[in-house]
Image: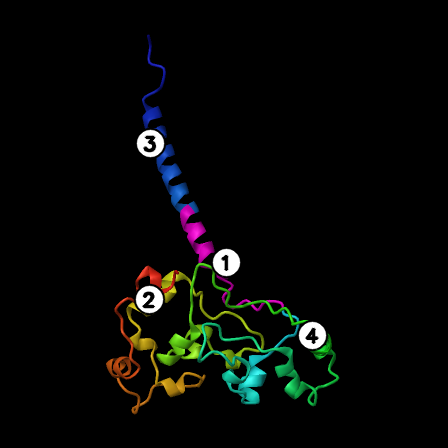
Amino acid sequence: MGQVFHPSANSLVRAGLGLLVILALLVLSSALLVERSPINTLVGVALSQPVPFSHAHHVDEIGIDCRYCHSSVEDEAFAGVPATERCMHCHSQIWADSPMLAPVRESFATGVPLQWARVHDLPDYVFFNHSIHVSKGIGCATCHGRLDQMPLTAKAESLNMDWCLACHRHPAPSLRPVGAVFDMDWRRNIDTPTAPGLMERNGVETRGLTNCSACHR
């Protein structure tokens, strides 16, 4: 029986297999890029909210402390979302008739809470405790970015597992004096203790920080 395929068919098969491998790598690379892009992480994407709340106005321009609205951040796992009554402490007097604040007034009148879209929404299988991070000297801006410069709130970091683990493996560079945790404009200076000094002063122990149970319970 004569030869069915021309000898050049071997080269064509090898070239085809090579192209398939390249195509598979391109698909995998594209999937990884999409996973880490704002399309998936929503970094820098301002979500639609019932009221366009501006941290830049309330924090930077007016000077309201983070803890006035997020009152449980020092003591509990959840930082707390302010009740409408907290908003009305000011807005019953200031911009009381503003059309933009109509949802706030309606919420206050009816007792139905505003349905804010959570910007930093971790999966249910991830446990994050705000109070522990605050007590160890992790500033708000470390995870949330410069909220005081955001007219509309958006994620500054992906908050994915790799990002969290990078800090848990080497927490020292992220530390600051506990008294400066809520200072959005804090910068290291000549009086700032060294990274090892902050580790000791803030009582940060690296043992166990990368255990699965530290975040998954």
Disc 2 target residue: 166
Q: Nearer the viewer, residue 156 or 181?
A: 181
In which quadrant will I find the N terminus?
top left
Q: Amino acid at mark 2?
A: Ala
Q: Please give the label number shown on residue 111.
A: 4
Disc 1 target residue: 40
- Could you tell whether 158 is left or right of 151 in the image? left
Q: Nearer the viewer, residue 32 or 201?
A: 201
Secondary-structure class at tag 4: loop
Q: Mark 3 near mark 1, Cβ–Cβ under 8 Å?
A: no
**Vertical placement of 56 versus 36: above or below?**
below
Q: Mark 2 near mark 3, Cβ–Cβ under 8 Å?
A: no
Distance (Cα) linking label 4 and label 1: 34 Å
Q: Which residues are magenta?
A: 28-48
- Could you tell whether 102 is left or right of 120 in the image? right
Q: Position of residue 214 (x, y in %)?
A: 35, 65
Nearest to viewer (mark 4 / mark 3): 4
Q: Position of residue 123 (x, y in %)?
A: 47, 60
The picture quadrant where one finds residue 69 is: bottom right
* Disc nearer the start of the sequence (1/2): 1
Disc 3 target residue: 14
Q: Amino acid at mark 4?
A: Gly
Residue 45 forms part of the magenta stretch: yes
In which quadrant will I find the C terminus?
bottom left
Q: Amino acid at mark 1?
A: Asn
Q: Position of residue 68 (x, y in %)?
A: 54, 85
Q: Nearer the viewer, residue 130 or 184?
A: 130
* Disc nearer the start of the sequence (2/4): 4
